[in-house]
Amino acid sequence: MASRLLQEAGGLAQALTDESAGARTAGATGAAHLAVVREVSLRLARTAAAARPVISSSPALLAYVRTELAAAPREEFRVLFLDKKNRLIRDERLGEGTVDHAPVYPREVVRRALELAASALILLHNHPSGDPAPSSADVEMTRQIVAAARALNLVVHDHLVVGREGVASLKALGLM
C-alpha cells in the first residue's frame, strides 16, 4: 500500500500532504494515519531546526523548509526570525498567494522582526511548479527587504526558494 501511495502521489512529501491520494489509496483511516505521520514529521523537523543554530547551510534547516513548503499547492512567503545566536525565534507565514505569486511587503517583514526582537532573518518561499529557480521578481523583492532590514541593523542571511526539485539559495547564487 505504501509503494502504491508513493507512486500515485509522486513522492513522500506529496503523499503526506495530498489527502485525496491518501484516501484513495489507504482509505479514510489510512488518510488519518498519514495526517498524523505528517504532523510528527513536521514537529521533528521543527525541533531539529530550533535545537541548533539556524544557518542557510544547515541540513536541519533544509530538511525543515522542504518538509514545510515543497508540496504546498500555493505559493507561500515565510520568514524565519532569528536571535543574535541564529536560533529560531519564530517561523511565520507573511504571505500566501496563487500558484505563481505570493504578495510580500518589505515594511511588514521588518515591522514583524522588530516586534519579535529578531536580529536576523531567513526568507523562504516555495514554487508550486516544483522548480526552485528564483525569478527576477523574487530577486527584486529580496533586494528591497535586505535594504529595509539593513537600515534597522537587521541581517538577512538568505532567501531560500523551495520546490519539489530542491532548494535554491539566492545568497549562494550571488543574487543578494
Image (spheres, rainbow, N blue to C red):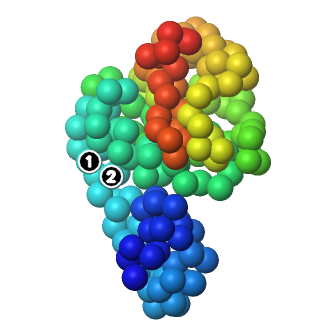
Is residue 36 visible to us here?
no
**Horizontally, is 156 left or right of 130 in the view?**
left
Q: Nearer the viewer, residue 73 or 129?
A: 129
Q: From the top left corner, tell me how far across and down residue 52 is, in percent.
A: 23, 37
Helix, strand or loop at label 2? It is: helix
Q: From the top left corner, tell me how far across and down residue 118 is, in percent.
A: 44, 28
Q: Nearer the viewer, residue 70 or 49?
A: 70
**Horizontally, is 158 left or right of 141 in the view?**
left
Quadrant housing residue 6: bottom left
Vertical order, 68 against 111 (above or below): below
Mark 1–mark 2 Cα distance, whole angstroms, equals: 5 Å
Vertical order, 60 against 84 (above or below): below
Is residue 149 visible to us here?
yes
> Residue at point 64% right, 47% down?
128
Helix, strand or loop at label 1? It is: helix
Assign the C terminus to one quadrant of the image.
top right
**Residue flagged by tag 2: what amino acid is it?**
Ala
Q: From the top left corner, tell me how far across and down residue 73 is, in percent.
A: 65, 55
Q: Which residue is mark 2?
A: 45
**Horizontally, is 96 left or right of 152 in the view?**
right
How many residues crowd mark 1 within 10 Å: few (<14), some (14–19), many (20+)?
Answer: some
**Horizontally, is 119 left or right of 109 in the view?**
left
**Residue flagged by tag 1: what amino acid is it?**
Ala
Q: Which residue is mark 1?
A: 48
Q: From the top left corner, tell me how far across and down residue 15 is, in percent.
A: 48, 67
Quadrant housing residue 104: top right
How many residues crowd mark 2 within 10 Å: few (<14), some (14–19), many (20+)?
Answer: many
Q: Nearer the viewer, residue 65 or 53?
A: 65
> Residue at point 74% right, 41% down?
100
